Image: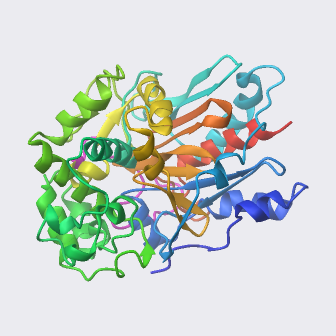
């Protein structure tokens, strides 16, 4: 399987060396937000799309989530200041963003989107586009709930690192100490699990699993069943040798959390994060039901084959059971709740300074920078997520005290000329590009 349409990217050095707007570079906005059929099967389950932003050229380049390359750590300061002094809005955020975002929304053919942009010194821009239900044409609302997919991973990472602060686990402990059945577990550290360097096979890449999920959408999967699927496959590489995005890592962290605390994962998330932040509309799903009010969620094709002919309508997959995602992607939230969460997540509100610094000790995969279950988008810290008909983006830029959140009720677009565009990420690209324009 090919991991990319293209593996070419624009790093910090090459971005800052460009002083003029380039047509070729702007084309990367589209190039890197596409996926091949085989790659989509992986990214359908969990998307990590890393956006690198240049002040000089207003460029956002997107790389794929499941790249597997030699890993090395980079210091937080290398990327945290890329966007310093970049955001300019002469009038209002709405005036600056609305025309381009609305145009892109229409081009993508997304049923509905919920968008929020907060920048220090400006009136926040919170808006909705389109409908929550294609059948009834009900307009989408700001408080509609959506599944947030892999953004769930940031909650898992935060809870786990709190246990590190409490002395219940050490980042350099072997995973074998807590889960003896993990293959090569004596040589895989907790840190490598959190930064996607374990080498363990991603269970959602398993062919049999993908085919089963395409025809049996309401199966309840246990965490143990999910990791067993992974363990039946050979590891992708030796621990620490490379880095590759794998949902298996998140499931293992979730299982260790439950083992160490004696509580359910959802209770730990609620008690430690969502309740303290007042995130009353955020839940950890244990079945396919959605709490009211919510948007319907849509998908082109099936779990294993998203390619459909031009003109095909997306399927309503709102109530597909998300248990297959569990710690890797089962949560549900709203725009305002994610706003409450974005800054505390990025700034380490719930962690000690030392542990937060450990979390943001980035692992580099080409142009992707990933910490302990958290991403760095050219200085904007957050994550992306996709599951069961929804795709979302959350990011906070400390340099500007700026937050960007996009939630869409379409997971991915597939057709003869729009292959694998991820709606929320595509809209986030437009937002960041417009914010950087003088």
Vertical order, 222 against 198 (above or below): above
Rendered image quadrant of residue 269: top left
Residue at 83% across / 52% down in the picture?
57
Whether the magenta-drawn stretch holds residue 321 is answered as: yes
Front residue of 352 and 270? 352
Front residue of 162 and 28? 162
Residue at 23% across / 67% down in the picture?
174
Res 314 visible: no
Residue at 39% across / 66% down in the picture?
42
Image quarter of the N terminus: bottom left
Residue 302 horizontal/vertical position (percent):
34, 60
- Magenta-drawn segment: 299-322
Vertical order, 109 against 178 (above or below): above
Res 417 visible: yes
Decide whether the magenta segment is chiefly helix, strand or loop.
loop
Residue 410 horizontal/vertical position (percent):
45, 45
Front residue of 405 and 12? 12
**Left or right: 250, with 67 as reference point:** left
**Left or right: 321, with 413 as reference point:** left
Q: Residue furthest top?
A: 123
Residue 14 horizontal/vertical position (percent):
78, 65
Whether the magenta-drawn stretch holds residue 44 is answered as: no
Front residue of 402 and 291? 402
Residue at 69% across / 57% down in the picture?
29
Residue 303 horizontal/vertical position (percent):
33, 61
Vertical order, 253 against 248 (above or below): above
**Left or right: 420, with 84 as reference point:** left
Q: Residue furthest left?
A: 262
């Amino acid at each position: 399987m090919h991991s990319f349409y293209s593996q070419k990217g624009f790093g910090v050095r090459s971005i800052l060396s460009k002083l003029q707007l380039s047509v070729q570079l702007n084309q990367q906005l589209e190039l890197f937000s596409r996926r091949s059929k085989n790659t989509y099967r992986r990214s359908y389950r969990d998307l990590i799309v890393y956006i690198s932003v240049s002040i000089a050229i207003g460029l956002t380049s997107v790389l794929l989530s499941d790249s597997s390359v030699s890993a090395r750590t980079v210091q937080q300061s290398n990327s945290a200041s890329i966007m310093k002094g970049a955001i300019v809005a002469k009038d209002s955020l709405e005036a600056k963003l609305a025309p381009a975002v609305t145009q892109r929304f229409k081009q993508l053919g997304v049923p509905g989107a919920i968008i929020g942009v907060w920048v220090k010194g400006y009136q926040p821009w919170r808006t909705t586009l389109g409908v929550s239900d294609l059948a009834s044409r009900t307009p989408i609302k700001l408080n509609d709930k959506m599944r947030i997919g892999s953004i769930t991973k940031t909650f898992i990472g935060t809870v786990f690192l709190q246990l590190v602060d409490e002395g219940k686990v050490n980042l350099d402990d072997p995973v074998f100490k807590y889960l003896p059945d993990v293959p090569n577990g004596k040589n895989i550290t907790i840190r490598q699990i959190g930064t996607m360097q374990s080498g363990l096979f991603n269970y959602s890449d398993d062919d049999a699993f993908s085919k089963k999920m395409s025809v049996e959408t309401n199966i309840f999967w246990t965490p143990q069943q999910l990791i067993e699927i992974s363990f039946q496959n050979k590891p992708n590489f030796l621990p620490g040798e490379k880095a590759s995005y794998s949902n298996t890592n998140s499931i293992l962290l979730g299982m260790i959390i439950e083992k160490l605390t004696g509580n359910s994962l959802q209770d730990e998330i609620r008690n430690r994060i969502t309740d303290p932040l007042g995130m009353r509309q955020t839940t950890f799903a244990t079945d396919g039901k959605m709490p009211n009010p919510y948007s319907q969620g849509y998908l082109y094709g099936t779990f294993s084959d998203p390619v459909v002919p031009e003109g095909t309508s997306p399927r309503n997959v709102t109530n597909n059971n998300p248990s297959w995602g569990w710690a890797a992607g089962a949560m549900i939230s709203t725009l305002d709740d994610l706003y409450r969460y974005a800054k505390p997540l990025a700034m380490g509100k719930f962690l000690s300074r030392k542990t937060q610094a450990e979390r943001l000790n980035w692992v580099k995969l080409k142009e992707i920078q990933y910490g302990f279950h958290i991403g760095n988008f050219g200085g904007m810290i957050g994550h992306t997520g996709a599951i069961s008909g929804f795709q979302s983006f959350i990011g906070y830029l400390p340099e500007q005290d700026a937050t960007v959140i996009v939630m869409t009720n379409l997971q991915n677009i597939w057709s003869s000329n729009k292959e694998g565009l991820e709606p929320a990420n595509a809209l986030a690209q437009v937002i960041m590009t417009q914010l950087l324009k003088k």
